[in-house]
Image (cartoon, rainbow, N blue to C red):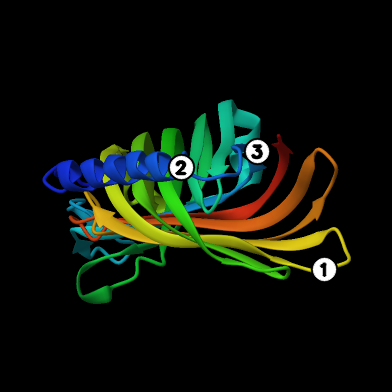
């Protein structure tokens, strides 16, 4: 269902990201302040939504009409995949020296045989197969890794802001088992659609936090956008946090989206997350 990415953009963005990170470390080590580190294990429970044009011809409707190819729009909720979760690992890390920083975020999740809601099956000229019963299950394994270097352009008592640039890697191995059936059992077919992806994207963005002097509360924010092996990828986060002696606790809403080159395919993960940061 999703296209296999090309790798023509990968060397430029990955080399640029590596050079940026190395220059960041080189400049940072010349500063007067010492290194500061931050590790944030977190739990993110996103809904997964995706759509794509698929070559699914010969779909017969209850009135006898045959259409194809069709577009598929589907979603999976945390309540559907938590009981089928095989493994998950999520963590962010930061190393900072003066105004310079290195930031990374690693997300891995794997679940199987999860009920998936197929919201729309659309045929040629925008035809909606509303009279067709759709049943689907998803097996998914995904890794998303972000690595970036940043420079702090604002450091005030009520606001801290970093500009950053780097790269994001996505590997996605997923199968969607789709059963389409018309009324009165006119049609009953089961297809297995592959959703595999593997590619790199260069990204630029901002991250930081709004502070409330005299209190322990703060508002973290993050936004990036990029391209490369995908047509477009973006990520955004906004939350509320509370500072403690050893770190902080943050509750946030996060969204991560990909728009792929072929088949008009896209994928978006969005939902709440809870993180606990340790600083030293």
Q: Nearer the viewer, residue 173 or 28?
A: 28
Q: Secondary structure at mark 3?
A: strand
**Residue mark closest to the camera, 1 vs 2:** 2
Asked whether residue 184 appears in the rendered view, the answer is yes
How far from the left and from the top, in percent, is residue 256? 47, 55
Q: Is residue 222 visible?
A: no
> Which numbered mark, 3 or 2, is in the foreground of this view?
2
Quarter holding the C terminus is top right
Gap between marks 3 and 1 measured at Cα = 23 Å
Q: Is residue 93 above or below residue 269?
A: above
Q: Which x, y percent locates residue 25? A: 42, 39
Which residue does the numbered mark 2 point to in the structure image?
A: 30
**What residue do we see at 66% from left, 40% from top?**
43
Left or right of residue 268, residue 190 in this image: left
| Residue 92 found in image quarter | top right
Write the residue at 77% across / 42% down.
Answer: 247
Q: Residue furthest top?
A: 86
Residue projecting furthest to the right? 214
Marks 3 and 2 sit apart, C-alpha to C-alpha, by: 27 Å
Which of disc 2 and disc 1 is earlier in sequence? 2
Q: Residue at x 29, y 37 (%)?
A: 196
- Find disc 1 in the rendering and name its residue: 213
Q: Quadrant of residue 257?
A: bottom left
Cα distance in 3D space between marks 1 and 2:
30 Å
Could you say which disc has been placed on residue 40 in the image?
3
Residue nearest the observer in this picture, 191 or 208: 208
Q: Circle 2: is it few (<14), some (14-19), or many (20+) Cα within 10 Å?
A: few
Give the secondary structure at mark 2: loop
């Amino acid at each position: 269902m999703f296209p296999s990415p090309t790798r023509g953009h990968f060397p430029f963005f990955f080399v640029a990201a590596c050079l940026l990170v190395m220059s960041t470390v080189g400049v940072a080590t010349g500063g007067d302040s010492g290194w500061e580190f931050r590790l944030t294990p977190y739990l993110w429970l996103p809904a997964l939504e995706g759509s794509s044009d698929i070559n699914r011809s010969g779909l017969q409707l209850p009135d006898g009409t045959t259409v194809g190819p069709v577009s598929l729009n589907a979603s999976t909720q945390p309540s559907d995949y938590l009981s089928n979760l095989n493994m998950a690992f999520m963590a962010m890390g930061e190393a900072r020296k003066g105004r310079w920083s290195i930031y990374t975020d690693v997300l891995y999740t794997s679940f199987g045989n999860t009920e998936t809601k197929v919201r729309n099956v659309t045929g040629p000229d925008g035809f909606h197969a509303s009279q067709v019963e759709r049943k689907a299950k998803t097996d998914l394994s995904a890794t998303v890794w972000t690595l970036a270097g940043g420079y702090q352009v604002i450091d005030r008592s009520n606001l801290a802001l970093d500009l950053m640039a780097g790269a994001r890697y996505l590997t996605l191995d997923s199968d969607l088992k789709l059963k389409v059936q018309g009324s009165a059992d006119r049609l009953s077919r089961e297809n297995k659609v592959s959703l595999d992806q593997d590619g790199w994207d260069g990204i630029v963005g901002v991250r930081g936090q709004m502070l409330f002097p005299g209190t322990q509360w703060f508002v973290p924010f993050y936004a990036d956008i990029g391209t490369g092996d995908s047509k477009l990828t973006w990520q955004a986060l906004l939350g509320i946090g509370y500072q403690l002696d050893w770190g902080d606790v943050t509750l946030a809403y996060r969204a991560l989206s990909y728009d792929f080159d072929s088949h008009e395919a896209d994928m978006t993960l969005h939902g709440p997350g809870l993180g606990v940061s340790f600083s030293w």
